[in-house]
Amino acid sequence: MSMKAPRGTADVLPEDAAKWQFVENTIKDICRRYHFNEIRTPLFEHTEVFQRGVGDATDIVQKEMYTFEDRGGRSLTLRPEGTAPVVRSYVEHKMHGNASQPVKLYYFAEMFRYERPQKGRMRQLNQFGVEAMGSADPAIDAEVIDLAMSVYRELGLTSLKLVINSLGDQESRENHRQALVDHFTPHKDELCSDCRTRLTQNPLRILDCKKDNDHPAMKTAPSVLGYLNEASTLYFEKVKNYLTLMGIDYEVDPNLVRGLDYYNHTAFEIMSEAEGFGAITTLAGGGRYNGLAEELGGPATPGIGFGMGLERLLMALDAEHIDIPADKDLDCFLVTVGDEAEKVSVQLAHELRNSGIQVDRDYQGRKTKAQFKAADRYQAKYVLVLGESEIEQQIINVKEMKTGTQEEIPLVKLVDYLQGKLSGGNVNE
């Protein structure tokens, strides 16, 4: 029996959790400014949600999902991606009937994919994502891309590349699909087994194949941009113009197809170009999905969104040597001398915590000197020393560790005193 974390998973230890919290809080504030609201969906869904929403021909559905039967014989799947569950919830709860449109949502969620673990690619991963549903305006496409870029910019990343493409509307996609079939069919026997299957199921995915990337037919494959009809071309031009107006640099890559079946029109990826980041450079990816709601039983509803791996975001911050500000200092540490002080400290700690002050104390029966050492390890800003004489006088000795100054404070004034000190104010006795 193995008592280690399963392959492809990782513990987030307390010293790292503070970094995660800072990143998540930064993202939540950005979402607030863009007027996106949080949604939380179940950890698992009926398997059909992903089969119909993501697509039977995708690698996720065919190779990577954790699927099981419950005791009622129902097929359930641990969430491998975030868009299909959010759209399922949107349809189920009839959010399309909301007076305010589009409905703008964000989520933090754990995803599960059975794939070969490597740096930046886990079997259990954490993802931040947004979905904006109910608007076919290209301006919302640009806004979603801008939100993603804002996350990276505000956290300090600079070595970024935004790549965009248009997959066109249904008519454009069908015309391009047929052109790809005609182009690759003569080379069918030279392609990998996956691409031979894709040729009939989803030929667009051939362009994203890593095995056949160097095949000569890849370099001469018809570009989707050559098959965009007038409406699709105009839509893509508007998205690009909006990005330019916001001062967002981008590159157009006609081979960017994304890995999921539900995309149409705008597709995009954000990549890290930081030295030493690794071979897998994609940080975030997304696009428009104007048919997904119908696939999941809802009315025709345009939508656009993206998913952003948080592990990969933290890797990018490390690669660019960006320190995440995390306050590790403890507000106060209680040092007690004697049994009576031990009892009083329990009540005192309770009172301080209920007043919003962070405090810890000794639970190992240590001597006074050892308690002070513990306060140093916790990087306590203030040490509160309580002994029998202090109890008799109803005072407490407060030592500011940074300056070494000490003051005797009446116990009844301690909360106000510390609140003033910790907020940076001047406290007059």
Image: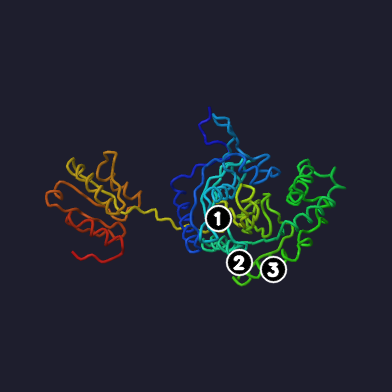
Foreground mark, 3 or 1, reads 1
Horizontal and vertical percent position of residue 32:
47, 61
What is the C-alpha distance between the residues marked 2 and 3?
11 Å
Horizontal and vertical percent position of residue 25:
45, 56
Instruction: Report which residue position mark 2 lands on.
Output: 139
Residue at (61% x, 52% y) in the render: 299
Precedes in sequence: disc 3 or disc 1: 1
**Mark 2 is on which residue type?**
Ala
Question: Viewer-proximal residue, 327 or 259?
Answer: 259
- Dot 2: element: helix
Classify 10 Å Cα crowding around label 1: few (below 14), some (14-19), many (20 and above). many
Vertical relation: 233 (above or below) 126: below
| Left or right for 348, reference 69 | left
What is the C-alpha distance between the residues marked 1 and 2?
19 Å
Residue furthest toward the top?
1
Residue furthest toward the bottom?
245
Horizontal and vertical percent position of residue 227:
78, 60
Horizontal and vertical percent position of residue 132:
57, 58
Residue furthest toward the left?
392
Residue at (75% x, 57% y) in the render: 171
Dividing the picture into quadrants, the one containing residue 346 is top left
**Mark 3 is on which residue type?**
Glu
From the image, which quarter does the C terminus lie in?
Answer: bottom left
Asked if the residues shown at circle 1 and circle 2 are in contact, with their CB atoms under 8 angstroms apart, the answer is: no
Residue furthest toward the right?
186
What is the C-alpha distance between the residues marked 3 and 1?
28 Å
Which mark is on residue 237? 3
Which mark is on residue 96? 1
Question: Viewer-proximal residue, 265 or 314?
Answer: 265
Regarding residue 276, the answer to whether it shows in the image is no
- Dot 1: element: helix
